[in-house]
Image (spheres, rainbow, N blue to C red):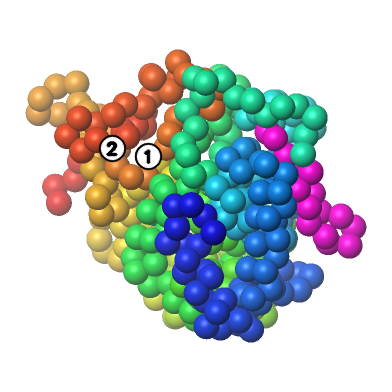
């Protein structure tokens, strides 16, 4: 068991004991029940422990499939770090990312869908200056303004905090069937793969072409009886232009871009529509707003225990840079101590990590 006794892992293990035969994860090739998912995840965790790799960085390049969830859970169980790669990345970018992260092992999927943890030839040693928390978590690489990949280190406890506070917020339950569409290289994919499982629901992993294919989107949504959708406003715009109309029981979670009033109107048949905001450095999202027709579209309010403010240049200005402080703020950038010092700080009033987002926002009257 994970040394920090993560809420998310305990909930998933409990769900497996109470409802072992319920569908946990499915893709186009089949389904894992909760008992199958947990059994295989424990096997991966044991492999990591037996190879003395606990606490190390393990890259995962198995594509969009149910086996990815097994590896993710197994890595979290062992207290190690999950580094997802996008299968369509050029080999050179994958190599750059793995080198910067100082990976110690790779998760491999054989032709007969057997998962395994394969140690790498390098020693996996990181610089002592690298900000790496104990207890594991994940790394996500973003391009940065210079185009050079930078790896954001997120502690497992931060992920735990975000997911724990998201269940009630988005009304996730054991009847939730979420359509996972995000690229594995983006942190939102982790949110998609874990949130339904914490509540006893089902993760339905879509083919990589689905965000651009309205017909397939509608077909698979009906086939799998999807009632929770996530994605960018651009993706949802493409779906509605293709004729898709959300069902009245649907929960929609939009992020990454501005939401227009026209899109909100076209999605208004859904039960609830959420606008979320958050840089990778703040663990998936830190602000959210339940949208309603006729109301102003804003970024909303922070998660409980998170503090945000707008740093303005002049006293009475209402537009400035957004700062975020709280349990979800990342640990820093791997192998980049100077950039970490520039963008992250410790908040003296709370003791939590803080992050300068670099995003300009405006305060609303509310």
Mark 2 vs 1, N-terminal side: 1
Q: Nearer the viewer, mark 2 or mark 1?
A: 2
Q: Are marks 2 and 1 in contact (CB under 8 Å)?
A: yes
Q: Quadrant of residue 212?
A: bottom right
Q: Which mark is residue 94?
A: none
Is 209 on the left or on the right of 24, as rendered? right
Q: Nearer the viewer, residue 74 or 209?
A: 74
What is the C-alpha distance between the residues marked 2 and 1?
8 Å
Image location (x, y in percent) of residue 49: 66, 49
Q: Which mark is residue 352?
A: 2
Residue that numbered label 1 is attached to: 329
Is 300 on the left or on the right of 246, as rendered? left
Say whether residue 110 is magenta.
yes
Is 47 on the left or on the right of 173, as rendered? right
Kindly give the residue lying farthest to the top in the view shown. Answer: 338
Please indicate, yes or no, whether residue 169 appears anywhere in the rendered image. Answer: yes
Q: Residue at x 55, y 79 (%)?
A: 17
Image location (x, y in percent) of residue 70: 67, 60
What's the magenta region?
103-118
């Amino acid at each position: 068991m994970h040394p920090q006794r993560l809420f998310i892992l305990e909930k998933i293990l409990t769900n497996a004991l109470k409802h072992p035969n319920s569908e946990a994860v499915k893709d186009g090739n089949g389904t894992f029940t909760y008992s199958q998912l947990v059994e295989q995840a424990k096997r991966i965790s044991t492999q990591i422990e037996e190879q003395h790799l606990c606490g190390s960085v393990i890259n995962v390049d198995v594509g969009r499939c149910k086996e990815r969830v097994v590896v993710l859970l197994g890595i979290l169980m062992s207290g190690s770090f999950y580094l997802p790669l996008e299968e369509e990345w050029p080999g050179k970018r994958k190599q750059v990312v793995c080198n910067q992260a100082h990976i110690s092992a790779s998760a491999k999927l054989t032709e007969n869908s057997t998962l395994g943890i394969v140690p790498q030839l390098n020693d996996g040693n990181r610089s002592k200056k690298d900000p790496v928390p104990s207890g594991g978590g994940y790394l996500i690489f973003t391009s940065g303004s210079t185009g050079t990949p930078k790896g954001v280190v997120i502690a497992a406890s931060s992920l735990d905090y975000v997911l724990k506070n998201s269940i009630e917020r988005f009304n996730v339950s054991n009847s939730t069937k979420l359509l996972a569409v995000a690229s594995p290289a983006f942190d939102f994919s982790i949110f998609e793969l874990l949130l339904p499982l914490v509540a006893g629901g089902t993760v339905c992993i879509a083919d990589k072409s689905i965000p651009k294919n309205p017909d397939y989107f509608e077909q698979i949504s009906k086939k799998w009886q999807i009632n929770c959708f996530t994605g960018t406003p651009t993706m949802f715009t493409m779906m509605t232009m293709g004729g898709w109309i959300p069902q009245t029981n649907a929960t929609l979670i939009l992020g990454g871009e501005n939401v227009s009033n026209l899109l909100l109107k076209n999605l208004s048949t859904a039960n609830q529509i959420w606008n979320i905001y958050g840089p990778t450095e703040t663990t998936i999202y830190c602000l959210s707003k339940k949208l309603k027709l006729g109301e102003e579209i804003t970024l909303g309010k922070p998660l409980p225990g998170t503090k945000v403010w707008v740093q303005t240049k002049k006293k009475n200005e209402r537009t400035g840079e957004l700062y975020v402080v709280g349990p979800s703020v990342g640990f820093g950038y791997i192998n980049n101590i100077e950039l970490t010092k520039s963008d992250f700080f410790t908040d003296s009033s709370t003791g939590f990590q803080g992050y300068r987002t670099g995003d300009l926002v405006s305060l609303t009257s509310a």
